[in-house]
Structure formats: structure tokens, C-alpha cells
Image (spheres, grey):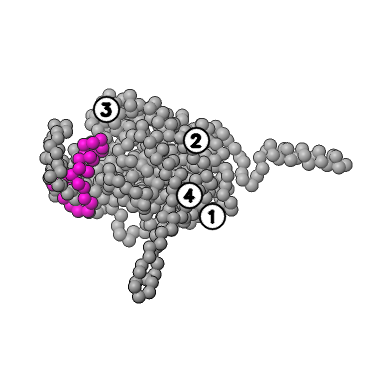
């Protein structure tokens, strides 16, 4: 599936050396490789993407520059979702929302969620997730992203929003379209998937500010055409702006997965990508949300153990991209001191996240941050032979296909309806995850941290209230007698 056609206007090219290469020659070389079809880049736009600060494009170009056009256009149909594929329906005993909008973060059902959003990196932008060739890797298939994709319905693709749609068909914010990394996109395509491919945790506060500002002004625009009027056949365009979000009253569900790029870049700047900095920028972002956004539940997903990604290799052009995207993980030799250090920093990231979030620091009546640990020990999916199942991975041997995104969506959903201490931690994706229904005795998203236990339910008064009412009744009876 070709995706990119580079239109190079030679009159606009400038001869500027970047990293020892002449810009004109470099752009023409890149254009020759990507002469396939679809979206046009001007030479100035391409120059901006390659040379003016977008490090991801540098890594991508370096990963493919040694391969022929034939190799780059080789198709792998097993990595995409077949046309007409359908999942069986998912039904639960209770799929209704609450009778009235809950005021407490502890009693929010799936059907009470009005808005979904996501922040993160390329795993959330779903880069390359449904690409048939290596040249499709820069396409961000946001509409099928595990945490925020809104393509079709649950039967078409399993994503967190598509599961929630079964409980509330009017949920807002899910991504509806594809984007190309580095190119401007509008909310009609991205929805509230405000993740940015290639970004690190120090970028998370910026993404968070973008989300807060967007939520404050979020509108859903609906277009409709009127019928043909009279003999003159005038067609009127009616634009209706529906205020899709009540910022103060609607319950919002945000999912954040961030930190893997910090591991991938750790050896390049150990101070910048330290575990302490990871925790600092995560805490700053969560503080912003807690201070400014009412009625929000934040899923923070524990980062993957990344060492096993070194096994995801295949003799294809795209697998060289794995080395480009995550050189600090891929380049060290086995059992080297560099690799041991990286494995330890990966574990330290996980420990820091637990120390930050398994407390009541980010918990109040209408706001909660919940650490969802299902990825903490996850091993890549394997075939019966023990080899990695490559159908779960895109052509770069690093990101997930739709098949992988669906397993992430199911793992996240299940964690949301499991209490702390009993949340499922996936040991391997070799066996498909089975979705669970919200428990009938607790049909709410679990949000209370372990340091703030409560057995209170929305229909049962607290112990203190019962005691006070009993005292009043007893006093009243004595006075009456």
C-alpha cells in the first residue's frame, strides 16, 4: 500500500550541508525512494521534517536508505486486518450507565464515561499498525490505536473506546482517522489522541497542556446537507455545532503510556533520561491534570520490560529500523555491562512509577490516577516453536500491528475493573486475552489507591453517617418518651 509521493520542486531546493550531506541531494534521494502515491510533500516541508528538529524522521531515513525500491515496496499482507473481518459480539449482564451522573470518582461505570483521550508516543499514535510495506511505517493509524482508536465498532477492531461504545454509544474523543508523522492534523482525524510519535517523557507536560486547553474548548461539529430546493436546485450546507463536552460535569477517561523512548535514548544522555527525570515529568503532568481538570480518571499504563524486544528480528529491510529507533537497546552485545545497565534502568522506571502512583497523592473525590500494570512482565507473543510471532509486529520489528493493539486494549480494560492487588499482569501475549465484564457487585472502574481503602458504596451510608443517625434517633425517642 503506497502512501507517500514526494514532489520535489528543484527551484525551491537550497544547497545546505546538514550532517555532511547536501540538502538538495539528500531530498532528491529520499524522493526517489518514496515515489509511490498519496500525500504530497513540498521540498520545504520535507526539509523541515528531515532536518529541522524531527529526530524520528532522521532515524527512519537512516533505517531504509540502503534498500532498493523493490525491497521497500514488498508487501506483507499477514500484518494487516483482512477486509470483512469481524469479532464476535461482547455482552455483559449490566451495560447501563448510572441513573444519574455520579459525583464520586469511586462510582463511575463504563457507561458514565463521556470523553476518552490519550497521551504518549508512537505506541499510542499506532504508527505503522496497518501498513503492508516498510514505506507505510510513517503512517499513524490513530483510528485503531489500542487506547483511543474509534474506527468502526468493537466488531471491526477492539480498542478501549470501541469497548466503551458498547456501554455508551455517544462517547466522544476517539480518533477517527490516519495521520502522517510530522504533518499537521486536525481534531477530526486525531480526536483526543494527542500523543506524538518519537517523544520522550520530558515532552509529556507539553502534551498535557495541549490536552487541557483542547478539553476546555472541545466541540463536535456535525455537517449535513439540506434537500434540493426548487427548480434552481440550490443545495444548502447546514453546520451544527454541538457542544460535545461539558468540561465541569462530564466524566473523562485519559490513558497515558510513556517512557519507552527514554529507555531507547538512555545511553545518549543518562542524566536527561534518568529514572528520576522520568518520575519528575510524569508527576508534573499528573499535577497539572489534577489541579485543572474535574471529573477525570487517568490510566497510567506500566511500561514494558523491553529486553525481549531484542528477539523481535527478521531478515527484512524494516528490521533495521529497530536499530535506528532504539539503538541503546539493540546495539549492546548480549551480557554486556551496557545491556545490564539498561535492563536495570528499565526496572527502575517501573519501580519509580509504582512508588509515585500506589499512594493517594493523585486521588480526590472527582479525580484519580490509577496504575494499570498488565504490561509489567509481558513477554512478546510466540509461536508453538518458541519463536516470536511476527504477525504482532509492524515492519520495523518494534511497534505493534492491529493484532497487538487489540491485546493491549483488552489488557487495559480488564485492569480497569480489577482492584489493586488483583489486577492481571500478562506474562505472555501468546494466548489471546479474554475480556472481562464489570463485576456485578462492583460495576465501577476501580480507582481507590491501596493507601485509602474504603468499603463505601453509593447506596450505603458510611459508618459515620449511620452512627450519627442512630444517635439522633435514640435521642429523639428518649425526648419523646
Which residue matches tag 2?
A: 291
- Seen at 52% across and 44% down, the residue is 248
- Pick whichever, 224 or 465, lies toward us: 224
What is the distance, in whole Å, between disc 2 and disc 1 at their CAs?
Answer: 30 Å
Which badge, 2 or 1, is on the more N-terminal residue?
Answer: 1
Q: Which mark is residue 268?
A: 3
Classify residue 307 by image quadrant: top left
Horizontal relation, residue 274 to residue 372: left or right: left
Q: Position of residue 14 (x, y in %)?
A: 14, 39
Which residue matches tag 1?
A: 96
Instruction: Specify few, some or many for label 4: CA neighbours under 10 Å numbering under 14, 14-19, or 20 or more.
Output: many
Callout 2–callout 1 Cβ contact below 8 Å? no
Which badge, 4 or 3, is on the more N-terminal residue?
Answer: 4
Which is in the foreground here, disc 4 or disc 3?
A: 4
Q: Secondary structure at mark 3?
A: helix
What is the distance, in whole Å, between disc 4 and disc 3 at their CAs?
Answer: 42 Å
Amino acid at each position: 500500500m503506497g502512501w507517500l509521493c514526494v514532489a520535489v520542486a528543484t527551484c525551491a531546493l537550497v544547497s545546505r550541508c546538514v550532517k555532511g550531506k547536501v540538502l538538495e541531494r539528500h531530498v532528491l534521494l529520499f524522493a526517489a525512494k518514496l515515489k509511490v502515491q498519496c500525500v504530497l510533500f513540498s521540498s520545504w516541508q520535507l526539509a523541515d521534517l528531515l532536518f529541522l528538529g524531527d529526530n524520528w524522521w532522521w532515524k527512519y531515513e537512516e533505517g531504509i536508505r540502503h534498500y532498493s525500491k523493490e525491497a521497500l515496496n514488498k508487501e506483507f499482507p499477514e500484518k494487516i486486518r483482512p477486509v470483512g473481518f469481524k469479532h464476535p459480539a461482547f455482552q455483559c449482564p449490566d451495560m447501563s450507565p448510572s441513573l444519574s451522573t455520579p459525583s464520586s470518582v469511586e462510582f463511575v461505570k463504563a457507561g458514565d464515561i463521556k470523553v476518552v483521550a490519550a497521551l504518549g508516543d508512537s505506541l499510542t499514535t499506532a504508527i505503522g499498525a496497518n501498513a503492508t510495506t516498510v514505506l507505510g511505517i510513517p503512517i499513524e493509524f490513530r483510528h485503531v490505536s489500542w487506547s483511543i482508536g474509534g474506527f468502526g465498532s468493537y466488531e471491526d477492531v477492539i480498542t478501549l473506546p470501541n469497548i466503551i461504545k458498547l456501554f455508551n454509544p455517544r462517547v466522544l474523543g476517539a480518533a477517527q482517522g490516519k495521520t502522517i508523522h510530522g504533518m499537521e492534523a486536525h481534531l477530526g482525524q486525531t480526536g483526543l489522541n494527542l500523543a506524538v510519535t518519537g517523544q520522550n517523557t520530558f515532552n509529556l507536560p507539553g502534551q498535557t497542556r495541549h490536552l487541557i486547553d483542547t478539553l476546555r474548548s472541545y466541540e463536535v461539529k456535525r455537517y449535513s446537507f439540506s434537500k434540493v430546493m426548487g427548480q434552481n436546485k440550490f443545495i444548502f450546507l447546514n453546520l451544527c455545532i454541538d457542544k460535545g463536552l461539558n468540561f465541569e460535569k462530564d466524566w473523562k477517561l485519559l490513558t497515558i503510556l510513556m517512557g519507552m523512548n527514554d529507555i531507547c535514548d538512555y545511553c545518549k544522555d543518562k542524566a536527561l533520561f534518568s529514572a528520576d527525570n522520568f518520575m519528575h515529568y510524569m508527576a508534573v503532568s499528573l499535577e497539572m491534570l489534577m489541579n485543572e481538570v474535574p471529573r477525570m480518571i487517568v490510566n497510567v499504563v506500566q511500561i514494558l520490560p523491553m529486553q525481549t524486544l531484542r528477539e523481535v528480528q527478521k531478515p527484512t529491510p524494516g528490521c533495521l529500523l529497530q536499530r535506528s529507533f532504539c539503538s541503546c537497546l539493540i546495539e549492546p552485545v548480549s551480557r554486556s555491562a551496557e545491556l545490564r545497565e539498561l535492563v536495570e534502568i528499565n526496572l527502575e522506571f517501573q519501580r519509580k512509577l509504582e512508588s509515585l502512583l500506589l499512594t493517594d497523592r493523585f486521588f480526590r473525590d472527582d479525580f484519580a490516577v490509577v496504575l494499570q500494570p498488565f504490561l509489567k512482565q509481558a513477554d512478546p507473543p510466540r509461536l508453538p516453536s518458541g519463536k516470536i510471532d511476527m504477525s504482532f509486529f509492524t515492519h520495523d520489528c518494534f511497534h505493534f500491528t492491529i493484532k497487538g493493539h487489540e491485546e493491549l486494549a483488552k489488557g487495559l480494560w480488564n485492569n480497569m475493573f480489577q482492584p489493586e492487588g488483583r489486577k492481571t499482569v500478562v506474562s505472555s501475549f501468546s494466548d489471546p486475552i479474554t475480556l472481562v465484564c464489570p463485576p456485578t457487585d462492583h460495576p465501577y472502574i476501580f480507582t481507590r489507591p491501596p493507601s485509602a481503602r474504603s468499603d463505601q458504596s453509593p447506596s450505603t451510608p458510611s459508618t459515620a453517617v449511620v452512627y450519627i443517625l442512630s444517635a439522633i434517633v435514640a435521642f429523639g425517642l428518649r425526648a419523646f418518651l
